Amino acid sequence: MTTSTWLSLDEALARIKAKFPTVKQTTLCHIDTCLGRITAQDIVAPVSVPPRAVSAMDGYAINTSVGKQNSCLPVVTTIFAGMDATDVTLEPGHAARIMTGAPVPMGADAVVMQENTTQRENTVCITQWPDRGENIRPQGNDIFQGDIIVEKGTRLQASHLMLLASVGMRECPVTAALKVAVLATGDELITPGTPLEAGQIYNANSVGVKALLHPYQADITDLGICVDDPAKLRDTLLTASKQFDILISSGGVSVGDADYVKDILDEIGEVDFWKVAIKPGKPFAFGQIGKCVFCGLPGNPVSAYVTTEKLVTPLIAMMQGEQRSLNDLTGLAVLGSSIRRRPGRQEFLRARLEINQDGGWHVTPLAKQSSGVMSTVTQANAYIVVPAETAFIESGTQVQVSPFRSVN
């Protein structure tokens, strides 16, 4: 069971949010390089889209007040996309050949699609008379000048960048990039690519943490590996705390004889909380060293992965000023096999989420759920979110699922 010193995930996130405000610094970022950045203010459209009424079809611009089905009209001009038709006025009873995206001339109030006409020489006969406004995209049909097109605190996606370009913007005001350092601790760790010796394991945590942080567009520095030596670890943490906004270490936060991180954090900084009632990932040291935010992840790979997802990335999003995060999108799915567990911590079970023959969502937990089994994270595409006090869930029950988020 949980103890009074353990926080629920929601309580931990609330503590994080209350402690660390949004960064104040902002910068202008070219739209080619601001994917994943956070808008520092509401973005207002400098122009309308389209800037004037344009044709939605290849066809003929006409005035619907003169004519009827099967009327034949003289074609007096042709208008292409990109032309300046400001001085073109269409008299009632005349038609203008017009292309998709071309400006609609003065005097025209509809466009007849080409398929509803027959043509001979300089005359067009209309086989299906249009309604007023048909096949015309009016000025500001998408955006009016002065509209707020992207709200402050939005993480910019590809669609936002296309929208900014559509109103002619080359730069966007965003919050300044956070400086984040990643550090692995442990005598047993070596860098991938180096031959293993007895008792050694590869440092996978730093690679995974950096990859999880990549979509958040922080300025990430890998500090490498620090051995289990209190003096060296203290010096490393102190030096890094003066250079970075956030310092993330992995390993050394439990209660083993070589787990020095929490004690050193107590000595040179402050610990806000230590244990979070989630599985995987109970030992998580959170605090600060000077002005630097400190996150101490567990050493087990899956625990480090999950705590980065559930605690570190929300911290970064909060400090960047993101207002609406996609991290916590959840839904319901039918459980494919029963779950029996020891209650006490909210658990994130690695699982396969699929659509069944009836079109509903169906989810099955993977067999290996140990915090040292990273292979099942790659086999999973969702978590089953099990409430802390739940001991048994029967197959066929609807359960809460959290699909894995796609990388930007």
Image (tube, helix red, strand yellow):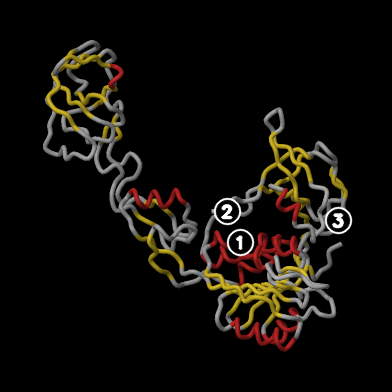
Question: Which residue is situated farthest in the front direction here?
Answer: 195
Task: Check the picture and name the quadrant holding the N terminus.
Answer: bottom right
Amino acid tagged 1:
Ala
Give me the residue at 79% from left, 46% from top.
Answer: 365
User: In this orientation, which residue lies closer to the viewer: 56 or 302?
Assistant: 302
Mark 3, Cα crowd under 10 Å, few <14 / some 14-19 / many 20+, is some
**Residue 381: image location, x then y, percent:** 69, 47
Q: Choose mark 3 or mark 1, whichever is in front.
A: 1
Q: Nearer the viewer, residue 347 or 158?
A: 158
Q: Tags 1 and 2 in contact by the CB under 8 Å rule?
A: yes
Mark 3–mark 1 contact, CB under 8 Å?
no
Residue pointed to by mark 3: 343
SS of the residue at dot 1?
helix
Kind of residue at disc 2: Val
Q: How far is mark 3 from mark 2, CA to CA?
A: 32 Å
Pick whichever of labels 3 and 1 is earlier in the sequence: 1
Give the number of the disc on residue 211: 1
Mark 1 packing: few (<14 Cα in 10 Å), some, or many (20+)?
A: few
Image position of 86 (left or right of 156): left
Q: Residue 151: give x, y in percent of width and height.
A: 44, 55
Q: Dot 2 corresponds to which residue?
A: 407
The label nearer to you, 3 versus 2, is: 2
Label 2 neighbourhood size at 10 Å, few (<14), some (14-19), many (20+)?
few
The image quarter in which residue 348 lies: bottom right
Instruction: Tell me: residue 260, above or below residue 328.
Output: below
Q: Secondary structure at mark 3?
A: loop
